[in-house]
């Protein structure tokens, strides 16, 4: 029986969301694990003894020299791996970024596992590596910045680097040319620190939207600008973080994952967790921040079909300590792990550094492939990304083998990067132990050397056979007008670097060449990049956006929809946005559903209704539509509920229920003296039998709704600090393409407290839509859409016995939105 409970609970694990799991599952697992452990202990009274010495089973495995390690690799037959740097030129490397001249900045996290080490491991650093002779190997190393706390990330900008060193993001720059930083300032502060050092913020990435994006991992934090003392801290737990390197304004958005974050050519974001190789971030949480009443699933969704069960093909021997730990777990001496089973390896237990290959040195078939380092198993996993609705699926690309694997147990591929030469670079932290000491049994840990390898590190690049070293780039000396054509370059590094240089220079001589490129670039990527470059120079106009909305490539149209948001008042742009409801590409329509929430007038309601009818069967589409329902939920409800075909299909009922919930939730909590503060609800039409009457909760305040997703581990505008920041400081929080107006407040006559105004709605919208529907008969059991009584003006009403026939009120003439006390709401209906 216990084995059955354990197996059933274990089978549920892969189906759980990475960021949410029910208390039932956790309780079942805990009971099963505890019971199985107690059985073993009962059979073996000495199983729990702590005085056993495992020293004889835990020999120290010595490191290999760089040359020996190079011979230990097994690489895909079409490629070779090259050593381009090794100790003493670097030590404990965990992140890297190339500047515009091909110089390489390396973040060194030497103090990893310092608490368990018997010797000091030093402090974090940033190294500057240079290839002075152009042969592709780095031959000069300089300590650029030293004396840092837990250095985990680095990103080049404007002749210097932004550095992640918990709890801060610093900016450092060398102004005298000696390779050492003489400018050092803290820009942001408040990022959290985890116990083991495995879940610190990481992966600073420049994106074509002219922002630096990063992963906050699992440590969270309350972040603010370090030099603006009056700035309100913003919670980043479970969120993504991005900032404008010029203005140093920041925002939170959808995130997730642990160590590693990457974007593909079109900006789709990927993350990973230790036991799960890849997630796709499905939406930008800044859109959901427009509607504080909307709850959403976690944005990061698993796209590897195997999930927790994804197997890997290790070729290195199992570390002795790992073998001992597995034996202790399976015999009850230690608590079992819910995903690792009875084998010490062969599964993901330390996925890291997820990276999309975007270079041009490899065959075209590999472009867009996704790579994940598995540092515990000494290998690199490869997946192919294939479309799956509005998302993607990551399919194993190398059946029965791995793209790169090593027999060296010290090989730790923690991060990867696309290089100026079009190759893929791999950081090898090269440590004896990559696991945090805090998560290991003391009976094992006391026999291990946690400092082994802190002074070592390797850097490799993977190139195809026959690769020839190109000339190193020197983009710092390239004229601005000559940077523009690089946005059409086949190598992602060149496009990214040109984009960054154009933004940091703010040179208006680039505007005319950019407009020409937007209209006539050979590749869709060049046309898309030019649109964002113009936006970064504040030179994007409605005509250029309109051209993008008509582009032959669906990816360009998708991004043009997003960039069209500030130009929604232009008649031609509005007309084209409405036409795109018939776009043949699903991703274009998906972005349109989000962007319509930034458009005023009646057109967005018509367009959203059309999208709901066509694509409402997809839950992600429904979320996008609901995110744009701010200010028009009642109108959408009226239009959709009048569609007899739509309201009877399952996804139609689901969307109508969600709209009804938004309408009711948007009602401010009434004060004690308000007669309209009734909590009575009425079922206004039946959606089926045998399920019992549907009920909706009492109206919630915006801050209540905002807290609930955060408390449940959800993302997407659920964090109250993120919502406050996005609404109070839209210019800082959002790009011009996704701004929302500040939240207005007033002192209400209901409760006397200032509160955010709710999205506008009209009671007549709901009443008119439901007026002809059959109400649920009293006592009849059946599911239905339930609307708060406060919205019930003009709805069909069943009188009690002897009170005459049911009568129907018509919608109010010239309906206006009212607050919970019945006073006219000053927010106009758009």
Image (cartoon, helix red, strand yellow):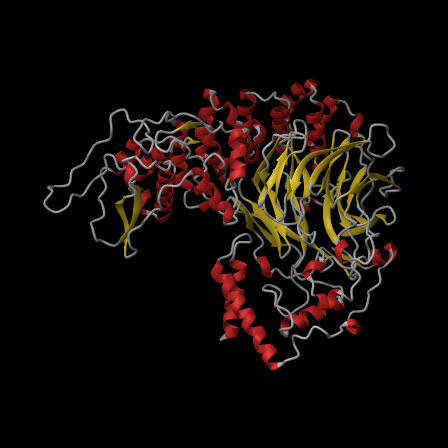
Q: Residue at x 71, y 65 (%)?
A: 442
410 and 531: which one is in front? 410
Left-right relation of 451 to 385: right
Location of residue 350 in the rendering, given as x and y in whole percent from the top left corner = 67, 56
Left-right relation of 570 to 171: left
Q: Is 222 rendered above or below residue 100?
A: below
Location of residue 362 in the rendering, given as x and y in whole percent from the top left corner = 73, 45
Image quarter for residue 64?
A: bottom right
Asked if one can make out residue 20 in the rendered structure from this viewpoint, the answer is: yes
827 and 579: which one is in front? 827
Location of residue 781 in the rendering, given as x and y in whole percent from the top left corner = 25, 54
Location of residue 815 in the rendering, given as x and y in whole percent from the top left corner = 29, 27
In the rendered image, the quadrant that contains the C terminus is top left
Image quarter for residue 41?
A: bottom right
Q: Residue at x 48, y 46 (%)?
A: 709
Image quarter for residue 177?
A: top right
741 and 370: which one is in front? 741
Left-right relation of 176 to 814: right
């Amino acid at each position: 029986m216990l084995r059955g409970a354990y197996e059933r609970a274990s089978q549920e694990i892969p189906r759980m969301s990475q960021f949410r799991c029910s208390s039932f599952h956790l309780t079942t697992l805990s009971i099963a694990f505890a019971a199985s452990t107690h059985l073993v202990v009962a059979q073996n009274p000495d199983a729990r003894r702590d005085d056993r010495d495992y020293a004889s089973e835990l020999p120290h495995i010595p490191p290999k020299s760089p040359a020996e390690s190079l011979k230990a690799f097994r690489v895909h037959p079409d490629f070779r791996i090259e050593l381009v740097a090794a100790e003493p030129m670097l030590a404990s490397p965990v992140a890297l970024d190339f500047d515009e001249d091909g110089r390489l900045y390396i973040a060194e996290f030497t103090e990893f596992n310092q608490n368990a080490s018997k010797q000091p491991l030093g402090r974090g650093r940033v190294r500057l590596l240079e290839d002075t002779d152009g042969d592709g190997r780095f031959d000069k190393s300089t300590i650029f910045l030293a004396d840092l706390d837990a250095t985990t990330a680095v990103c080049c900008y404007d002749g210097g680097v932004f550095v992640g060193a918990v709890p801060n993001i610093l900016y450092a720059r060398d102004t005298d040319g000696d390779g050492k930083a003489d400018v050092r300032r803290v820009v942001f502060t408040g990022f959290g620190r985890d116990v083991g050092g495995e879940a610190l913020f990481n992966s600073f990435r420049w994106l074509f939207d002219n922002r630096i994006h990063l992963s906050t991992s699992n440590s969270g934090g309350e972040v603010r600008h370090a030099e603006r003392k009056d700035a309100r801290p913003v919670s980043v737990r479970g969120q993504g973080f991005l900032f404008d390197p010029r203005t140093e304004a920041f925002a939170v958005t959808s995130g997730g994952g642990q160590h590693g974050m990457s974007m593909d050519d079109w900006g789709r974001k990927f993350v990973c967790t230790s036991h799960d190789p890849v997630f796709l971030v499905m939406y930008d949480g800044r859109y959901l921040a427009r509607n504080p009443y909307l709850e959403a699933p976690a944005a990061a969704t698993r796209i590897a079909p195997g999930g927790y069960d994804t197997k890997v093909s290790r070729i290195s021997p199992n570390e002795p300590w790992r073998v001992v730990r597995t034996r202790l777990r399976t015999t009850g001496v230690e608590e079992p792990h819910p995903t690792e089973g009875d084998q010490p390896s062969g599964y993901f237990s330390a996925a890291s550094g997820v990276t999309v290959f975007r270079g041009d040195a490899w065959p075209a078939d590999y472009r867009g492939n996704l790579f994940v380092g598995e540092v515990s198993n000494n290998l690199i996993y490869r997946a192919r990304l294939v479309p799956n609705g509005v998302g993607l699926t990551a399919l194993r690309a190398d059946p029965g083998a791995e793209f790169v694997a090593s027999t060296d147990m010290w090989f730790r591929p923690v991060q990867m990067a696309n290089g100026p030469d079009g190759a893929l670079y791999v950081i090898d932290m090269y440590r004896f132990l990559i696991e945090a000491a805090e998560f290991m049994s003391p009976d094992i840990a006391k026999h291990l050397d946690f400092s082994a390898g802190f002074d070592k590190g390797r850097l490799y690049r993977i190139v195809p056979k026959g690769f020839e070293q190109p000339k190193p780039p020197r983009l710092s000396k390239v004229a601005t007008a000559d940077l523009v054509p690089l946005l059409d370059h086949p190598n992602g590094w060149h496009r990214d670097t040109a984009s960054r240089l154009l933004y940091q220079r703010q040179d208006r001589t680039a505007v005319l060449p950019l407009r020409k490129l937007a209209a006539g670039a050979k590749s869709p990527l060049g046309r898309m990049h030019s649109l964002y470059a113009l936006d970064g120079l504040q030179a994007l106009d409605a005509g250029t956006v309109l051209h993008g909305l008509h582009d032959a490539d669906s990816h360009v149209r998708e991004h043009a929809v997003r960039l069209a948001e500030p130009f929604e008042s232009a008649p031609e742009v509005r007309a084209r946005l409405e036409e795109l409801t018939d776009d043949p590409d699903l991703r274009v329509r998906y972005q349109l559903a989000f962007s319509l929430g930034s458009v005023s007038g009646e057109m967005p309601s018509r367009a959203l209704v059309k999208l709901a009818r066509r694509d409402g069967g997809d839950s992600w589409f429904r979320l996008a539509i609901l995110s744009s329902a701010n200010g028009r939920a009642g109108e959408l409800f009226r239009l959709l509920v009048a569609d007899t075909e739509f309201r009877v299909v399952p996804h139609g009922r689901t969307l109508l229920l969600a709209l009804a919930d938004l309408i009711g939730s948007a009602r401010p909590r009434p004060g004690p003296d308000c007669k309209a503060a009734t909590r009575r609800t009425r079922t206004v039409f039946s959606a089926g039998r045998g399920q019992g009457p549907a009920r909706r909760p009492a109206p919630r305040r915006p801050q209540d709704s905002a807290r609930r997703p955060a408390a449940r581990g959800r993302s997407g505008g659920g964090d109250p600090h993120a919502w406050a920041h996005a609404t109070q400081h839209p210019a800082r929080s959002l790009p011009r393409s996704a701004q929302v107006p500040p939240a207005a407040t007033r002192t209400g006559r209901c409760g006397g407290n200032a509160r955010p105004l709710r999205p506008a709605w009209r009671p007549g919208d709901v009443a008119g839509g439901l007026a002809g529907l059959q109400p649920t008969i009293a006592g009849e059991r059946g599911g239905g859409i339930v609307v708060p009584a406060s919205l019930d003006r003009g709805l069909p009403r069943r009188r009690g016995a002897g009170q005459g026939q049911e009568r129907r009120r018509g919608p109010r003439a010239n309906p206006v939105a009212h607050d919970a006390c019945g006073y006219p709401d000053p927010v106009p209906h758009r």
